[in-house]
Amino acid sequence: MHNHIAFRFSSMVFFILLIASCNSTPDNVKTTEYRFFDSTRSFIKLNDTRRNGAVIDKGFFYPKSAFSFSYRYCAKSPSHAKQDIMEFQALAKRVCDANTGQLIHQESGTWCVSNANTVAEYPFFSARISSTELWADLCLDGPFVTLKVIENTNAPYGKWYDAAQVLGYQPYTQYRKLISVNTDQGELYLVTKEPVSADLWNEESRYIYTNIGQIVCLFNQPDGSGLGYTFRGTVESVSNGRVKVLATTKLKGDIRTAPALEQLEWHREAYINAVANAWFVCG
């Protein structure tokens, strides 16, 4: 009964939000009339459990810092986490529908787009939510619930469109492959880890490749390693599309989503050489 009331309340907040978040539409560009980021913040504020969480993956590098929002909190129980996921998914679908959009599913996650699967396709926002028991030692009662939103922040059309591609959106082509997910109830595609662009170069990898001395990180998750780990160090040299880094720190899990920076025992330092797009800016 409580969950039913909470869901109805979240629906009411959403429709109030629709009225409050109208934006003007630039000439010749179909943009979101209702922002999902605003709805997400209202979703977080609905109860103390969600409010007690924290923003994670603050995005040290443009365009992450401008367009990406990630948040994590401890759920009261696995059943509460499941209910929260259902509510957030339904909210994402309602916002997408209100913008006359359609949900499509790619390796980077679920995107709400206009004119889906046509040359005129345009991304409105990306939404993702999941829960995990892997960090249960930090949560007394339930799993961590993680949600992520990638959305335009009133940037010009070209700037947002390019940024969306860096952050995982694949524009329409006849060769593009989408992932089949039932969206009758607004299910979002569950991404198990951060996608790595198939292209060697994007804005972040080009920046790393041309900035010797930059602090960068690399996430590695060998088969059977559970959480995996992140190496952090400084760019020493670059050659033939590869970046050589003097790594001095090994951290537990993927620091882009981990609730805390937990350092692991490791060598004092070691060189790691990997392709440019395997690295991300982390300091």
Image (cartoon, helix red, strand yellow):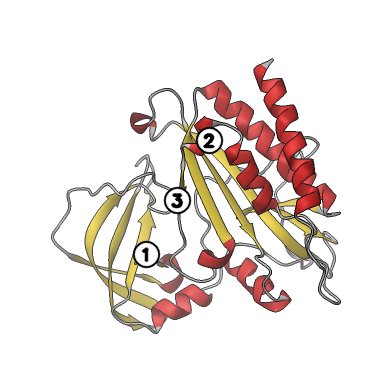
Looking at the image, which residue is at 35% across and 63% down?
Answer: 217
Q: Amino acid at mark 2?
A: Arg
Q: CA distance from mark 1 to mark 3?
A: 13 Å
Badge nearest the viewer, 3 or 2? 2
Q: CA distance from mark 1 to mark 2?
A: 26 Å
Numbered mark located on residue 272 in the image: none
Mark 1 Cα-neighbour bin, 10 Å: few <14, some 14–19, many ≥20: some
Q: Is residue 81 left or right of residue 250?
A: right
Sequence-wise, which precedes: disc 1 or disc 2? Answer: 2
State the residue position of label 2.
50
Q: Position of residue 104 (x, y in %)?
A: 75, 52
Looking at the image, which residue is at 39% across and 50% down?
Answer: 254
Badge nearest the viewer, 1 or 3? 3
Q: Is residue 168 left or right of residue 240?
A: right
Q: Position of residue 175 (x, y in %)?
A: 74, 65
Q: Is residue 201 left or right of residue 113?
A: left
Q: Is residue 184 visible?
A: yes
Sequence-wise, which precedes: disc 1 or disc 3? Answer: 3
Looking at the image, which residue is at 13% across and 60% down?
Answer: 268
Mark 3 Cα-neighbour bin, 10 Å: few <14, some 14–19, many ≥20: many
Q: Quadrant of the C terminus?
A: bottom left
Q: Is residue 181 visible?
A: no
Question: Closest to the observer: 40 or 226?
Answer: 40
Q: Residue furthest left?
A: 268
Q: Is residue 139 left or right of residue 153?
A: left
Numbered mark located on residue 282 in the image: 1
State the residue position of label 3.
56
Q: Position of residue 168 (x, y in %)?
A: 60, 62
Q: Which quarter of the picture shows residue 6?
A: top right
Looking at the image, which residue is at 64% across and 46% down?
Answer: 40
Q: Position of residue 240 (x, y in %)?
A: 40, 83
Q: Amino acid at mark 3?
A: Ile
